[in-house]
Amino acid sequence: MFDPSKIGRSFPPFTIEVERGKVRELALAIGDENPMYQSQQAAQAAGYADVPLYPTSPTIFAFWGVGYPQLLEHWASLGIDVDRVLHGEEAFEYLIPIAPGDTLTGVMTLVDAKTTTGQAGTSLDILTFEFRYTNQRGEPALRLRKVVIVPA
């Protein structure tokens, strides 16, 4: 069972630069050949100021900024068995447009934790993390909520 006294714990801020090339790499990785993800000119022709982000692009922001090993270290410091973490869900709330060239500073906070027990007596810890991002002007830009499930 997860220790609920750890709810509210935040981790050191991390910074990422939103790069046009990373958006292009994501498009290539998922096989999207839409030219607006390939060049600023094509994006502008489609009505965007710059290459748009995929709506789910922030999923990888934490990995760019915190770095995957460090993210797992943060989770482990909460007592989470990182080898057993399952992805639950994610939700994104864009507060202002985010574009290539923006520098985002994110802070990850554990905002909720609960344990549920199944009929067979097994239990799952359901943990919710919130990532709050501000841009280079200090403006709130994005909130990401990530739910992870850990068999207890």
Image: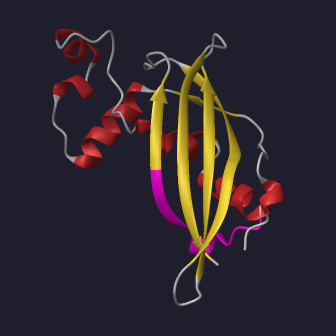
- Is residue 97 visible to us here? yes
Residue 68, by quadrant, is bottom right
> In this rendering, would 99 be left or right of 144?
left
Whole-percent x and y of residue 33? 16, 36
- Left-right relation of 104 to 87: right
Q: Residue at x 17, y 26 (%)?
A: 35
> In the rendered view, does 19 fall on the left or right side of 151?
left
The quarter of the picture where residue 145 lies is: top right
Instruction: Tell me the quarter of the image containing the N terminus.
Output: bottom right
**Above or below 143: residue 66:** below
Residue at horizontal 24%, vertical 16%?
A: 43
Magenta span contains residue 85: yes
Examine the rendering and report whether any part of residue 38 can be seen: no
Q: Nearer the viewer, residue 60 or 94?
A: 94
- Most extreme residue toward the right, as rendered? 5
Residue 13 in the image, given as x and y percentages of width and height: 73, 35
Please identify the residue farthest to the front as the structure is shown: 119
Q: Residue at x 79, y 61 (%)?
A: 77
Residue 27 position (above or below residue 87): above
Q: Residue at x 76, y 43 (%)?
A: 11
Magenta residues (range): 79-89
Q: Nearer the viewer, residue 141 or 34?
A: 141
Q: Looking at the image, which residue sits at the far bottom?
A: 120
Q: Tally the marks.
A: 0
Residue 115, position in %: x, y? 65, 69
Residue 127 location, x and y as percent? 62, 58
